[in-house]
Amino acid sequence: MAVRSATIHVMAGAALKAARGLIRDFGEVEQLQVSIKGPGDFVSAADLKAERLIRAELARGRPGYGFLMEESGAAPGSDARHRWIVDPLDGTTNFLHGLPFFAISIALERDGEVVAGVIYEPIRDEMFWTEKGAGAYVNDRRLRVSARRRIGDAVIGTGLPFRERGDHAAYLRTLAPVMAATSGVRRMGVASLDLAYVAAGRLDGFWEFGLQPWDIAAGLLMVREAGGYATDFAGAHGMPASGDVLAANDHLHPVLLEMMRESMRRVDAPAK
């Protein structure tokens, strides 16, 4: 049986407490779908409420730690070495539309390096957690990335830009070769869970552009502790700055990385 450290207990406890409110609020979304105003304001309030609760629980468990939170931004603490990185509701659009796929993501950063992470999926009651050097787990089961070697057998997760966000044309250039080479591409709308699913071997890989630190901090560590690779599209570790992420096992990561690089070369090539 996996033994959780005191730090993981603090993080998991905060996620569980916030999840109870999110589950109650999620139960109201379907009723609000039929109203003229719609559920948007209600979901925004649920997001903020979850963030406040998580912040209070983490501050009680580890006084003095700083915060980087999706809604309220950065807040330094008296302990300059440690910072919590929190997304209280990853998958807000899913939540808004009554789709039961969303998560709470909490990471702990020490001296600029993420050393622990929790990603909790309330509907399935799955607690993904990891600590640097201690492996990655879902509930009490050890996680390992998939062992698939052939790109043709792989299912790859991604995120899609929408409305005016992101470079749609550039993204489609990366999507086309992955669609042609794999068994399928999945877009679930929750980057933290996509990374957790790579760690669990449910997805064989994942890529997305322009993510925020709270989307990826816990998940990147989880993939690595489960034996996978997570880099930017240059094959380096610039993800917190760029937000561009590619994660997979050691067999598929080089193949996907070359696809991304070739796609980027086509994007950057001068028009004739």
Image (cartoon, rainbow, N blue to C red):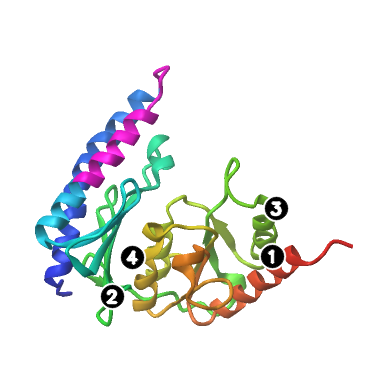
Q: Secondary structure at mark 1?
A: helix
Q: Residues within 10 Å of mark 1 (few under 14, many from 20)?
A: some
- Where's residue 18, x and y in %? 20, 47
Q: Quadrant of residue 29?
A: top left
Mark 2 or mark 3, which is nearer the start of the sequence? 2
Marking on residue 111: 2
Which residue is identified by label 4?
218
Cβ atoms under marks 3 and 4 closer than 8 Å: no
Amino acid carrying label 3: it is Ala
**Front-most of 3 and 43?**
43
3 or 4: tag closer to the N-terminus: 3
- Distance from disc 4 to disc 1, alpha carbons, whole Å, reads 28 Å
- Above or below: residue 127 compared with residue 19: below
The CA span between labels 1 and 3 is 14 Å
Lower sequence index among marks 2 and 4: 2
- Give the magenta-colored segment's residue range: 34-52
Residues at marks 1 and 2, CA–CA distance in whole angstroms: 39 Å
| Res 193 seen here | no
Instruction: Please state which of the two labelled residues, at mark 2 or mark 4, is closer to the viewer.
Output: 2
The location of residue 80, given as percent across then percent down, is: 22, 69
Q: Is residue 66 magenta?
A: no
Q: Nearer the viewer, mark 1 or mark 3?
A: 3
Q: Which residue matches tag 1?
A: 177
Of mark 4 and mark 1, the one earlier in the sequence is 1
Amino acid at circle 1: Pro
Nearest to the eye among marks 4 and 1: give it.
Answer: 4
Query: What residue would you read off at disc 3?
Result: 169
Q: Secondary structure at mark 3?
A: helix
The residue at 29%/34% (across/down) is 45
Q: Nearer the viewer, residue 191 or 252?
A: 191
Where is residue 176? Give x, y as percent: 69, 60
Tag nearer the camera, 1 or 2: 2
